[in-house]
């Protein structure tokens, strides 16, 4: 019996060790990083980003603290777009990203290319950190693989740049209800502790009778006396024992809420 030649044997040298705490993350990462098309790109990617020797996870975390290698790794890089099978679609739909990637600033080019690779392999953007790790390491973890994530959105617009960033929870097809609950807890904590979100501190406890207080406030704005407001309220709500003092206190309470 003739043994069939294994024409994919060379891929063993490019195999990525996947260490994921969740099975669903393991599957998601494996089904991208075991693709021959992705593995065939790795040598060229590593050449582009000056990776003659793969680095350890510890070194990777040191270089890429907070997702930005700064100048600790390299100063310049030039992406080779010829390897993309979807280049025409990229030129049509992602012209701004291609303009950005044509710079030579290392962190910018690297991040942009990771997003291009997400598009090339039909993966959502949250894969970009894992792809970056695969370029520099032979091991990928799910520490930075976040299909569900609470983040502060800081877009390049006047609204957001005047320190009014919103918080969003990004979800993916693999997101579970428990994932959302966990990220919701993180989002609430961000709102309490992150200085960028300190511009808005709403009352999270409901003021009793808020609808009534607002109505009386606006009646007072119209020029009615506290007694007039109480009398008119009693005509429509005979079961309530409303006095002018109730109206007075309610209006003062509402004014304090408006001033907070």
Image (cartoon, rainbow, N blue to C red):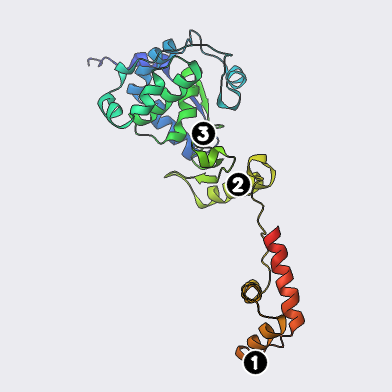
How far is the residue under mark 3 from the one under mark 2? 18 Å
Q: Is residue 124 above or below residue 65?
A: below
Horizontal side of residue 75 vs 10, given as left or right: right
| Number of marks | 3
Quarter of the image with the N terminus is top left
Q: Is residue 167 above or below residue 10?
A: below
Front disc: 1 or 3:
1
Question: Is label 3 in a helix, a strand or a loop?
Answer: loop
Front disc: 1 or 2:
1
Decide: few, some or many residues near mark 3? Use Cα within 10 Å; few <14, some 14-19, many ≥20: some
Quarter of the image with the C terminus is bottom right
Asked whether the residues under the numbered discs 1 and 2 touch, taking CB atoms below 8 Å apart as contact, a structural biologist would say no
Q: Which residue, given by chain and number where applicable, does mark 2 sit on?
A: 187
Q: Quadrant of residue 83?
A: top left
Q: Earlier in the sequence, mark 1 or mark 2?
A: 2
Asked whether 8 or 242 is in front, the reply is 242
**Residue at x 36% of width, y 23% of height:** 98
Q: Is residue 44 above or below residue 99?
A: above
Question: Is label 2 in a helix, a strand or a loop?
Answer: helix
* Coordinates of residue 19 in the picture (x, y in percent): 53, 29
Asked whether 176 or 205 is in front, the reply is 205
């Amino acid at each position: 019996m003739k043994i069939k030649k294994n024409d994919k044997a060379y891929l063993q040298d490019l195999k990525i060790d996947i260490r994921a705490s969740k099975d669903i993350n393991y599957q998601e990462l494996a089904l991208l990083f075991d693709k021959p098309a992705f593995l065939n790109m790795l040598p060229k990617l590593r050449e582009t980003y000056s990776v003659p020797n793969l680095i350890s996870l510890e070194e990777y975390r040191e270089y890429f603290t907070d997702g930005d290698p700064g100048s600790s790794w390299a100063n310049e890089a030039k992406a080779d777009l010829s390897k993309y099978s979807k280049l025409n679609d990229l030129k049509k739909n992602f012209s701004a990203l291609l303009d950005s990637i044509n710079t030579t600033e290392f962190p910018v080019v690297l991040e942009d290319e990771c997003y291009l690779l997400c598009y090339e392999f039909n993966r959502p953007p949250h894969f970009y950190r894992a792809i970056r790790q695969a370029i520099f390491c032979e091991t990928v973890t799910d520490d930075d693989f976040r299909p569900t994530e609470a983040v502060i959105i800081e877009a390049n617009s006047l609204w957001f740049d005047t320190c009014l960033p919103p918080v969003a929870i990004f979800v993916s097809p693999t997101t579970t209800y428990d994932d959302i609950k966990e990220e919701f807890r993180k989002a609430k904590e961000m709102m309490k502790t992150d200085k960028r979100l300190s511009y808005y501190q709403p009352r999270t406890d409901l003021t009793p009778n808020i609808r009534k207080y607002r109505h009386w406030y606006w009646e007072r704005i119209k020029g009615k006396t506290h007694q007039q407001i109480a009398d008119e309220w009693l005509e429509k709500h005979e079961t309530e024992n409303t006095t002018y003092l109730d109206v007075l206190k309610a209006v003062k309470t509402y004014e304090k809420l408006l001033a907070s």
